[in-house]
Image (cartoon, rainbow, N blue to C red):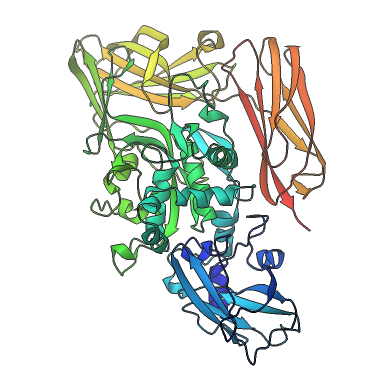
Amino acid sequence: MDYTQQTMDYTQQTMDFTQQTMNYTQQTQQKIWGAGDDPCRLRYINFEVSENSISHETQGLSKDNLVVRRGKPFKITLMFTGDSWDPRTEQLVLEVCLGSMSEKVPVQFSDQCSNPGGWSANIYRGDMNLQSVAIHICSPVLTAVDDSVYMSQTSKLEEYIKSDYGLLYMGSHLNVSTRPWSFGQYEPGVLEACLQLLQVSPQHLSDINTDYIRRVDPVYISRVICAMVNCNDDLGILVGKWQGSYKDGVKPTEWSGSADILQQWVSSKCRPVRYGQCWVFASVLCTVMRVLGVPSRVVTVFNAAHDGNGNLKIEEYYSTTGEKLSLSKDSVWNFHVWVECWMRRPDLGALGEFDGWQVVDPTPQEKSAGVYSCGPCPVAAIQHRDLGTPYDTGFVLASVDADIIRLIVRNGQVVGRMEDTNLIFFIGLSRKCSHLSSSSPEEMSAGLEVSLSINGEPTVGEEIALCVTVTNNSSGSRVLMEHLSAQVKEFNSSPQESFWTSHKEVHVNPGQALTLQHTILPSQYESVLAGDDIVNVAVVIKDASTKERVLAAQEFSISSPKISIEIEGGDSVDLKKEHTAQVFFINTFKKTLNEAVLTVEGSGLLQGKQEARLAVLQPGDKIEKTVSIMANSPGTKVLTATFSHRNSPSVVCRGFQKVSVMTD
């Protein structure tokens, strides 16, 4: 039968997060009346969960409940006892209920949806016998061109709605690191947790019916969910923490998927889960939005500005010896992670210029309309620098397009000033930018230029090579003092005290570009620097005669050695069948490691954690663990491993392998 291919195509991609969807996730009631007051003798209603989930491509979202996509017919079967139902004398009517709202839907004899703009219920020819009847139900749906979250390309639907696995990009723009994340839409209880999140929102608790009605609007839904992912204003999911001890919860870097977080939130009766940072907040938001049918992706911004006063300028302060100082309320995060959701924005005009990807940022930073949320802010508005477009455009614009002003201070006085208009920039999705280098400040001396670069990819246990280039554009020789300083920092805060410095006098001839090489040895940083840590390094060049000072700064992350994971038969496994995975780590350090521990885990693949331990791991030796994995649900899973040792407890090496679960 033809139910309009256009409708069928576009509703494949959109989980019905409006009031209509919830009618069929155990919040639907059906009542059947006869021609008189007495109901027909109905024995059983079969929701045909297996058949409908295949037809609607919702397999795995719920084991027991019917989950359908709006606008496409689904089937239920009514079974009677006693005398058969007689369509000549008795009429069937379905009543769809949500909260205190309801709608009666007469059942018609027809082979197509009789009311595409509203609810319809039809019996097709040949779909009834003496004891049962199959009814084909279709929920209301708009035309494809009017659907607020319509996305036509099948490949994009697979990636932004159905995919339950992704890579998060972190570190620094010079050394981008990846971390796997399991969005976990198909894990047990995740769909129910997402619906529970809506039910405990302040909007629902204050006005149930209005909330149900407004759920058709993805702008409304995204603002509700964004605020609910953090717990600052409500019964939300996550507590944020960026420093100090994490002993009363889970350190943000230890999370690898959304399912564990959502399941813990539900099982604790909506008590907030400890702890999250930006990538955790964003990944959980992405999971919820995908479950609710809004195409979503996780995006990383490197060198993300946090502009406290809204002037699109970020001030950084340095000492005359190159040490970065904590004197500014503004800051630049090495990376920041948020979500982009795909939707139309009819609230911003009929022309559609602001349709498409919208920034939605759940990390609690600044309040929007009185609550800790951000967006949806159209990416198009950022590109056009349209600060008047809702929501929170100014704050988002500063994140990706602020200017950096670097000031050298001595005894409370500014003795040098450089402005960088190109450092803050935007990196989307899986675009890797390890080839980028730092830009040169605009306000440099006409006679003296300096640049700072990092050679290669710094790795724990290896030397860190720095290169300073000083160019003398003047007609005379110069005697210069070079001051270098290296500091460890969190990705979102000011650096700690310098762990390495260098000071020396250099001579540069007229027109000469002098290259100065520096090396930080492992013994000089291993007590303070761990894998995935970020280093701020700066150089101040001072002319001994003119007292002129020029500064260059760079930040980079330091990588850890890799863990290898090999799965028997490749990276695709069969559903509910055992497979073997081999996990191992080779000691590439030049020293013996004591009390080595290799830990393997994988949501949806392994029960709990499995470990291998060695008292001593010599250079070049291997620690390994063989595990049996079995996937109980479809989708993409992630097998993760960590390696730690007593010599440097803060140094944790990580590895991961995605696993595609194949169904028959």
Relative vertical location of residue 581 with respect to residue 373 in this rendering, above or below: above
Looking at the picture, tell me which residue is in the foreground, 357 or 303. Answer: 357
- Residue drawn at 46 percent across, 14 percent down: 518
Res. 442 image quadrant: top left
Instruction: Determine if residue 620 is in view.
Output: yes
Please provide percent x and percent y for residue 486: 41, 15
Looking at the picture, tell me which residue is in the foreground, 382 or 130. Answer: 130
Rendered-image quadrant of the C terminus: bottom right
- Residue drawn at 56 percent across, 36 percent down: 178
Q: Is residue 210 left or right of residue 168?
A: left
Please provide percent x and percent y for residue 11: 54, 69
Q: Is residue 660 left or right of residue 280?
A: right
Looking at the picture, tell me which residue is in the foreground, 128 or 574. Answer: 128
Relative vertical location of residue 77 with respect to residue 625 in this rendering, above or below: below
Q: Is residue 65 left or right of residue 285?
A: right
Please provide percent x and percent y for residue 239: 44, 33
Rendered-image quadrant of the N terminus: bottom right
Relative vertical location of residue 115 with respect to residue 642 in this rendering, above or below: below
Count of numbered circles on the image: 0
Please provide percent x and percent y for residue 43: 71, 72
Q: Is residue 260 left or right of residue 468?
A: right
Relative vertical location of residue 55 with respect to residue 234 in this rendering, above or below: below
- Residue drawn at 33 percent across, 63 percent down: 353
Res. 89 image quadrant: bottom right
Instruction: Determine if residue 451 is in view.
Output: no
Looking at the picture, tell me which residue is in the foreground, 238 or 283. Answer: 238
Q: Residue furthest bottom?
A: 88
